[in-house]
Amino acid sequence: MRKTGCSEDELFSFLAQKKKLDLAPRYILSSMCTFPHPVAVKAHCMFMETNLGDPGLFRGTSSLEQLLIGRLGELFHCSTACGYATSGGTESNIQALRIARAMSGKERPNIILPESAHFSFKKACDILGLESRPVPLDPDHRVDAGKVAEAIDRNTCCIIGVAGTTEYGMVDPISELAGLALDHGIFFHVDAAFGGLVLPFLPVSPPFDFSLPGVTSIAVDPHKMGMSTIPAGCLLLRNQEDLCSLSVDTPYLTVKQEFTLSGTRPGAPVVGALAVLEYLGREGMEAIVAGCMESTRRLIDGMESFGISREVTPDVNVATFQPVSVPPPWQVSYTRNGHLRIICMPHVHAGIIESFLEAIGEQYAETAD
Ligand code: PLP
């Protein structure tokens, strides 16, 4: 560390220099995060110092967290849902599995999840000592519910379904999985980290939420399609009792128990997340989601016009194609199976899609020469 601090000018010119090394957002087609909405940034700055880890000190901020959970609960058809703001999908998934394990009381618990499940479940199983039972997908990249049924045994403590898979943007057969969970009395966690703020705003979408009686918990990330500042995830539960299974005593805080994973938790992105939902309302979110879906369709049509075929028609704004390379500086990603993957987030607007298609068209023309 420096013995004497540097000047503010020196400091910020150093930071600005480093920031220039970041890829310009317009070229980022591979991320499930996006540019935060201006009201999220404004709200974030307003609540910068708040710490939800000691809610009695920040009663107003804490009430806004509860309002966010309430709004999401309503959106997911359970106005009495409870929960809290996490750091993102990874923490929500870990916590859901902790609850499932605690509530089951099983000694050698296993979980059943789609092969497409996010890698955060690997971390969760490692931390929690859970046996993971990945189940194969059908040709449309959705989990095969029949194979999920076959994998259940008396040690199964949780079934997982994904509403908007990370790699292919598909929704698993959540209704069927919820039915299985209900029949067997097993905790059913829906990972809607991405799709949770897309599906409710589509003109037509499959049920994936608490409207299905078998759904026990839902992970949803405002820092993805909710356009909040980072980090903002949420874990929602149908029953308060489930959440309380994680409670530990916190004797020196303003509240005497907490069920969260982190202690200190930022209020700023949580208020940012709420600000976006309040400011845009259902109509505003529908417009944003409609734009992203339109970009996804245009991208797929454009790529197919160059002979680059889609892997699957996605349920949400994730487009995948046969493996092809793309010219720099465009930043795309590739799935485990090698498919080209592009997420049409709000910052990937129509103009950007057209520029990208132009670059792809030029590359393919060059390759053909
Ligand atoms: N679940 C799903 C479906 C995801 O797509 C992701 C991230 O892309 C996660 C969980 C993990 O979220 P985070 O990176 O916010 O921890």
Image (cartoon, rainbow, N blue to C red):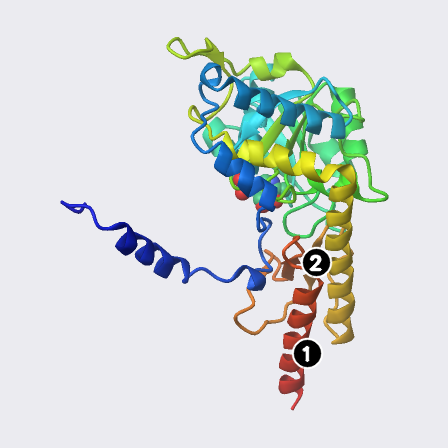
Rendered image: mark on residue 305? none
Identity of the residue drawn at 24% across and 51% down? 7
Residue farthest toward the right in the current orientation of the protein: 204
Identity of the residue drawn at 81% across and 33% down? 176
Residue that label 1 marks:
361
Residue 270: % across, % down: 55, 32
Q: Residues within 10 Å of mark 1 (few under 14, many from 20)?
A: some
Mark 2 secondary-structure assignment: strand
The part of the image, by quadrant, that contains residue 1 is: top left
Q: Number of callouts in the render?
A: 2
Marks 2/1 in contact by CB < 8 Å: the verdict is no
Residue 184: % across, % down: 74, 20
Nearer-the-camera pick, 195 or 358: 358
Relative placement, left or right, of 235 versus 247 is right
**Ligand 1 in which quarter:** top right
Q: Residues within 10 Å of mark 2 (few under 14, many from 20)?
A: many
Q: Is residue 86 visible?
A: yes
The part of the image, by quadrant, that contains residue 180 is: top right
Residue 228's place in the image compared with 246, above or below, is below
Residue farthest toward the bottom in the current orientation of the protein: 369
* Image quadrant occupied by the C terminus: bottom right
Mark 1 secondary-structure assignment: helix
Residue type, label 2? Ala
Assess mark 1: CB under 8 A from ligand 1?
Answer: no
Rendered image: mark on residue 319? 2
Residue 99: % across, % down: 57, 20
Residue 56's place in the image compared with 40, above or below, is above
Residue 88: % across, % down: 55, 36
Q: CA distance from mark 2 to mark 1?
A: 17 Å
Residue type, label 1? Gly
Identity of the residue drawn at 58% across and 40% down? 40
Q: Is residue 123 visible?
A: no
